[in-house]
Image: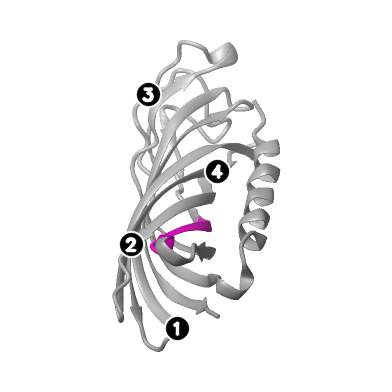
Amino acid sequence: MSYRPMLAKVLVLCVWMLVWSDSSRAEWYLAAHGGLQVPQDLANIRGTGSFSGVTSNDLNLRNQSAYGVKAGYFFSDAWNWIGLEFDFSHSDANIERQGITATAPILGATQQNGMTPRVGLTSNNMVVNVIARYLGQHLQPYMGVGAGLGNSLLRTAPHAESVYYPVFNVLVGVKMFLTEHLALFSEYKHARASVEFSDNQFKADLRTNWFMGGIVYHFGP
C-alpha cells in the first residue's frame, strides 16, 4: 500500500495550521533541533509475498545523529496552553553487521550465509503533534502526542527501496527562555511504526527514541 497521498494531506494540514487563526493574536514559533536517535531492534520480522511464513530474529540497529525542524502555533486566550505543531525529523537507523536467521533473502544479496553486513536504513518522520504546555515565565515544560507519515530508505543490494507508512509518537520536553521570544529546549520523543518493504518482501516493527535539543523563536503580537 502506498502512503504517498498521506504526505500531501499532512502538508496541506500544516499549511492550514500555519494560516488559520487571527494573526494579530497568534503565538507562532519556529525551531531547529539536533541530537541522537537511539532505535530499538527491528522487531517482529515476518515475510510477505513469496516469502510469506518466513520469520527472522530481531535485528540490532545502530545509534545515529539526528536533526530536524518544527513549526507550530498556540491558541489564544483561555486555550493558550494548547497548540499544534509540525515536526520533521531525520536520522539513520542502520542495521548492524550480525547474524540473521531468516531462511529467505529478505535483505537481498547483502544477506549471505546467515550473516548480513551493515545495511543503511534511514528514518524520516513528518508528524503533526498536539502540544500541552505549562506557561512558566522562564521554564515551560510541555508534552505532546501526534501522528503523521514516516519514510525509510533500505539500502540493500542490488536495489534500494523507499517506503512510506503511518507513524505515531509521544514526546516530553522543556523550554528555557533566554529572552521574551528566544528559548533553548530539550526533548525526548518515542516513535513507532509498522513498516512493509514490499520489494524485499518483509515487514517489521520500527521503534525509535529521539533525544533532541535545539533553539526556538516565538513570534508574538
Q: Could you tell which of marks 1 and 2 lies nearer the N-terminus?
A: 2
- How many C-alpha atoms fall within 10 Å of the one at disc 3: few (<14), some, or many (≥20)? some
**Residue 150 marker:** 4
Q: What's the CA distance linking mark 1 and mark 2? A: 16 Å
Q: What's the CA distance linking mark 4 and mark 3? A: 27 Å
Dot 1 amino acid type? Leu
Say if mark 4 contacts mark 1, CB within 8 Å.
Answer: no
**Residue 94 marker:** none
Q: Is residue 159 visible?
A: no
Q: Could you tell which of marks 1 and 3 lies nearer the N-terminus?
A: 3
| Snapshot colouring | one colour
**Residue 182 marker:** 1
Horizontal relation, residue 83 to residue 11: left or right: left
**Residue 130, position as x, y percentages in the image:** 45, 52
**Residue 101 marker:** 3
Dot 4 amino acid type? Gly
- In the rendered image, the quadrant that contains the C terminus is bottom right
- How many C-alpha atoms fall within 10 Å of the one at disc 4: few (<14), some, or many (≥20)? many
Q: Closer to the camera: disc 4 or disc 1?
A: 1
Residue with the mark numbered 2: 142
- How many C-alpha atoms fall within 10 Å of the one at disc 1: few (<14), some, or many (≥20)? some
Q: Is residue 37 visible?
A: yes
Q: Residue at the spot x=67%, y=30% of the render?
A: 2
Residue stretch in magenta: 79-90
Residue 133 counted in the magenta span: no
Label total for image: 4
Q: Is residue 78 placed above or below 193 in the rendered structure?
A: below
Residue 89 counted in the magenta span: yes
Q: Could you tell which of marks 2 and 3 lies nearer the N-terminus?
A: 3
